[in-house]
Image: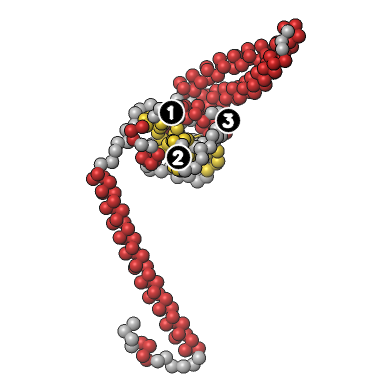
């Protein structure tokens, strides 16, 4: 976790809550002394809406502040990414690439990170505080020709019996060129999701990430490897069919022999002299 980033958000939220309290007090004062102030019905409605808005907002801000403070205090006591306790899969909302394409990322994290999502902290704020080692696993699903869903909620589910992987996708922050959109994505999915020229990438540590463009030789090598695997599969499939046929022939012969024995007949010698 980027503790300096969390501390910054704590300070920002503390200041924001003070502004919320000022706005609430101002709206309450104007509503209480509306007749003396000569306020119109239109202004009364406006101050009433402001009061409802800031009363709701301050609850959210205080909850977020408490969660960040708790995580700030607890994170210093965690000595390993795989801390004692359960792991959680957190599924982030869809991120839009263009008018007809989007992607969705799921990350595997410990309870210290998951509880921020579960308590309604903005997932953009949480992601901005993460470092690469906070993410135990990451998966991204790219989907095209589906409507973009403007949802801010993060799905959180508990995961049991997870074995850490030897090799992991690098979590990357991808920004669509010319848009104020930035999302978390598995590095292995970048070629699928974005044209190389119109997007910038950064690791969660802030380093620039350049996936590069595959050369013709690399593409040709992948094509050759795919063709080789296809040939091996076809050979194995043919072998499987041959073995299955021989096994079925043996079963038929055994069934025939058993039937003949039960009927009290002597087996025909020709049965054994057909070269099988």
Residue 273 higher or lower than 233, as above or below: below
Give the side of residue 187 with respect to residue 128, left or right: left
Tag 1 secondary structure: loop
Tag 3 secondary structure: loop
Percent across and percent down for residue 131 are 43, 30
Residue where numbered disc 1 is placed: 179
**Image mark for residue 120:** 3
Q: Nearer the viewer, mark 2 or mark 3?
A: 2
Give the side of residue 39 with respect to residue 82, left or right: right
Residue where numbered disc 2 is placed: 101
Percent across and percent down for residue 104 are 47, 39
Q: Residue furthest right?
A: 35
* Pointer 1 local density, CA inside 10 Å: few below 14, some 14–19, many at least 20: few
**For marks 1 and 3 on the same chain, the one whose residue lies earlier in the sequence:** 3
Give the side of residue 188 with respect to residue 160, left or right: left
Distance CA(mark 2)–CA(mark 3): 26 Å
Q: Residue furthest bottom?
A: 265
Q: Residue furthest left?
A: 217
Say if residue 108 shows up in the picture: no
Percent across and percent down for residue 191 are 36, 40
Residue 212 higher or lower than 19, as above or below: below
Q: Quadrant of the C terminus?
A: bottom left
Image point 33% across, 86% down: which residue?
A: 274
**Image mark for residue 100:** none
Residue 256 higher or lower than 204, as above or below: below
Q: Quadrant of residue 205?
A: top left
* Pointer 2 local density, CA inside 10 Å: few below 14, some 14–19, many at least 20: some
Image point 71% across, 10% down: which residue?
A: 39
Image point 47% across, 85% down: which residue?
A: 258
């Amino acid at each position: 976790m980027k503790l300096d980033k969390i501390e910054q958000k704590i300070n920002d939220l503390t200041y924001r809550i003070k502004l919320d309290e000022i706005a609430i007090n101002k709206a309450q004062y104007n509503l209480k002394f509306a007749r003396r102030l000569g306020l119109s019905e239109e202004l009364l409605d406006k101050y009433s809406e402001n009061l409802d808005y800031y009363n709701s907002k301050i609850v959210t801000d205080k909850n977020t502040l408490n969660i960040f403070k708790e995580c700030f205090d607890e994170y210093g006591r965690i000595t390993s990414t795989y801390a004692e306790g359960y792991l959680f899969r957190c599924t982030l909302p869809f991120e839009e690439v263009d008018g007809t394409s989007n992607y969705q990322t799921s990350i595997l994290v410990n309870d210290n990170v998951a509880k921020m999502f579960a308590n309604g902290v903005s997932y953009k704020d949480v992601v901005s505080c993460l470092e690469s080692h906070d993410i135990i696993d990451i998966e991204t699903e790219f989907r095209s020709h589906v409507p973009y869903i403007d949802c801010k909620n993060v799905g959180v589910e508990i995961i049991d019996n997870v074995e850490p992987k030897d090799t992991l996708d690098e979590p990357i922050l991808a920004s669509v060129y010319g848009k104020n959109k930035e999302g978390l994505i598995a590095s292995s999915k970048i070629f699928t999701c974005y044209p190389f020229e119109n997007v910038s990438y950064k690791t969660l540590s802030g380093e620039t990430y350049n996936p590069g463009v595959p050369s013709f030789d690399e593409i040709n090598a992948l094509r050759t490897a795919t063709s080789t695997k296809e040939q091996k599969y076809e050979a194995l499939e043919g072998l499987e069919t041959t073995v299955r046929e021989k096994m079925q022939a043996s079963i038929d012969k055994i069934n025939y022999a058993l039937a003949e024995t039960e009927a009290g007949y002597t087996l025909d010698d020709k049965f054994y002299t057909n070269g099988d």
